[in-house]
Image (cartoon, rainbow, N blue to C red):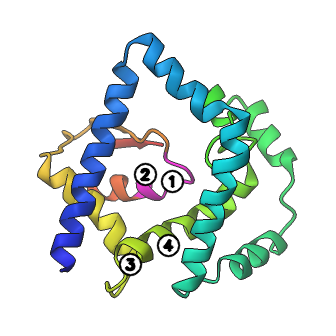
Amino acid sequence: RAARTMARCTMARRAMARTMVLLLAAPRGEATLVRALFGSSLFRQLVVPHARATMVRTAEANGIPWRECLAWLRGARAWDDGALARVQRDGVDVPEYYRAPFHAYEQGNLCWEAALEQELAGKAVGVRNFPRAPDPEEAFRASFDAALDSLGAACPDGGAIVDLGCGTGTSTRRLAARFSRAGTVG
């Protein structure tokens, strides 16, 4: 059963990757339509809050104390936007799409809320897709490794890996460990 679940997740990830490639290569009108849908205020007001609430409920129903952890993280220090401004001022070129509304974050993924929730979201997705695994999040992350293996992914010594859309870097760190003789950027 676990092997079937992993195979389904791997197939779903491959299909999602192909879909993303198709969207990126789509004729201008189709790609514009998709961006318009995801960028619409109606989509953000109706779909996004429901999807986020579903993720939080699913996480908590499976033993991940999302709200409690998030409250602890928020209280651990002062999360001010000054730190983000300093990063940008120190010559880091941040692509505009990091600031565009995405998933549950009106300010985009370059915000404290996205950073604070990223690991919780990974755990929630893991426990939902691999409920019987001893470590559901590890099973979830390993499914990406299995997909890379099945596709014959390789990077030569001294090569470069660019992890697009890496969030807070969970996948980037995993790729850096997997391809330790390559440069990894996320």
Q: Which percent across, then down, holds residue 133? A: 31, 84
Q: Residue at x 46, y 67 (%)?
A: 125
**Left or right of residue 178: residue 66:** right
**For marks 2 and 4 on the same chain, the one whose residue lies earlier in the sequence:** 4
State left or right for residue 32 relative to residue 110.
Answer: left
The crowd level at tag 2 (other Cα within 10 Å; few <14, some 14-19, many 20+) is: many
Q: CA distance from mark 2 to mark 3?
A: 19 Å
Q: Residue furthest top?
A: 28
Q: Which residues are magenta?
A: 166-173
At numbered mark 4, what does the secondary structure look like: helix, strand or loop?
A: helix
Q: Which residue is mark 1?
A: 169
Let me know if residue 150 appears in the view: yes
User: Residue 123 — which label?
Assistant: 4
Asked if disc 3 and disc 4 are in contact, CB closer than 8 Å, the reply is yes
Determine which residue is flagged by label 3.
Answer: 136
Which amino acid lies under the numbered mark 2 shown in the image of this protein? Thr
Q: Tell me the amino acid under the disc marked 4.
A: Lys
The answer to which of 106 and 146 lies nearer the viewer is: 106
Q: Is residue 70 left or right of residue 26?
A: right
Q: Quadrant of the N terminus?
A: bottom left
- The numbered mark, 3 or 4, whose residue comes first in the sequence reads 4
C-alpha separation, residue under disc 1 versus residue under disc 2? 5 Å
- Between disc 2 and disc 3, the foreground one is 3
Label 1 environment density (alpha carbons within 10 Å; few <14, some 14–19, many ≥20): some
- Residue 47, percent from left and from top: 63, 49
The three-letter amino acid code for the residue at tag 3 is Pro
Could you tell me how far apart the alpha carbons at marks 1 and 3 are, in whole angstroms?
Answer: 19 Å
The residue to which callout 2 is attached is 172
Closer to the chain start, of discs 2 and 3, is 3
Which label is found at residue 6? none
